[in-house]
Image: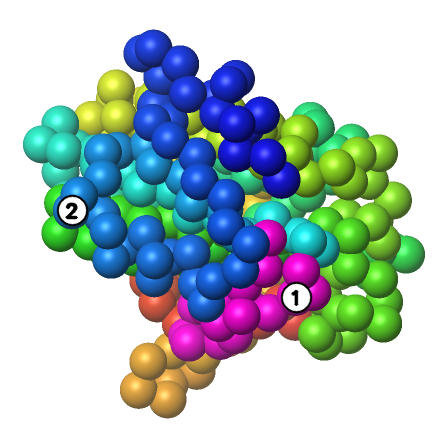
Amino acid sequence: MNAAALERPLVVDGGLWSSVEVVAATGSTNTDLAARAAQLPEGAVLVAEEQTAGRGRLDRSWVAPARSGLFFSVLLKPGDGVPQERWGWLTLLAGVAAVTGLSRAAGVDTALKWPNDLLITVDGEERKTGGILAERVADGVVIGIGLNVTLTEDELPVPEAGSLLLAKAAVTDREPLLKAVLRSLERWYGDWRAAGGDPAASGLQEAYAANCVTLGRHVRADLPGGRTLTGTAEAVDADGRLVVRSAEDRHEAVGAGDVVHLRSVR
């Protein structure tokens, strides 16, 4: 990917993006950008052609062949206009931005699994094609997005994974896909920040629910401390937590943990 070709349409006066850097390979774009966050303005974007130590939630690894996907991180600094207790919505905001941008640019339906997985359908089967990791830094948040674009079946890290290529996406050129996601992220972030981080007033909470296939599903949540919660995922609350109704008809908001889709509820 060409940094100059990406910067020309993205780095504009009054826009969010301040720089776009492309490196051939690195361990983790999140780690690299977080280490430099204090010296960089908001809107810095770091893209890697290859990640050798990419990370997902719960310290899971994210590795793919060079130039087979999008591996990038962005630096956001919401500032005093958004209370820090609302910054947790940035992971979900990035998910909404990714699915709306990719659906438009790649011509393939993309959906969200709470809280941060990007799903596509391959031969009628729901598969993970991407993920999002947000990390706090001194005065902001670094958000990393990893997306499988051209991986073949033989290159997938696990059978449950997928790629835009396998989903028969109309576009698999990574530069227009990256530009689409960044433009979508700029729009959603601008609306959210203008609303003081209010997920309802900015339309973010509604958009997330509309794109989240976890809602309405029978799920198992593996919670911190070894506890397991099984029930129906009914809503995403104002704090971005997944509200699960158990068999005993009790509602519990899940803010951290691993959620597994068990089956559809009819």
Q: Position of residue 72 (x, y in %)?
A: 49, 48
Query: What residue is shown at x 77% (from left), y 40% (from top)?
Result: 172
- For residue 136, which quarter of the picture? bottom left
Magenta-colored span? 49-66
Residue placed most toward the observer, 63 or 101? 63
Above or below residue 174? Residue 132 is: below
Q: Main secondary structure of the magenta part?
A: loop
Left or right placement of residue 102 versus residue 241 in this view? right
- For residue 185, which quarter of the picture? top left
Query: What residue is shown at x 60% (from left), y 69% (from top)?
Result: 63
Left or right placement of residue 54 versus residue 165 in this view? left
Mark 1 or 2, nearer chain start:
2
Mark 1, residue position: 64
Instruction: Tell me the element at label 1.
Output: loop
As drawn, the label of residue 208 is none
Residue placed most toward the observer, 109 or 36? 36
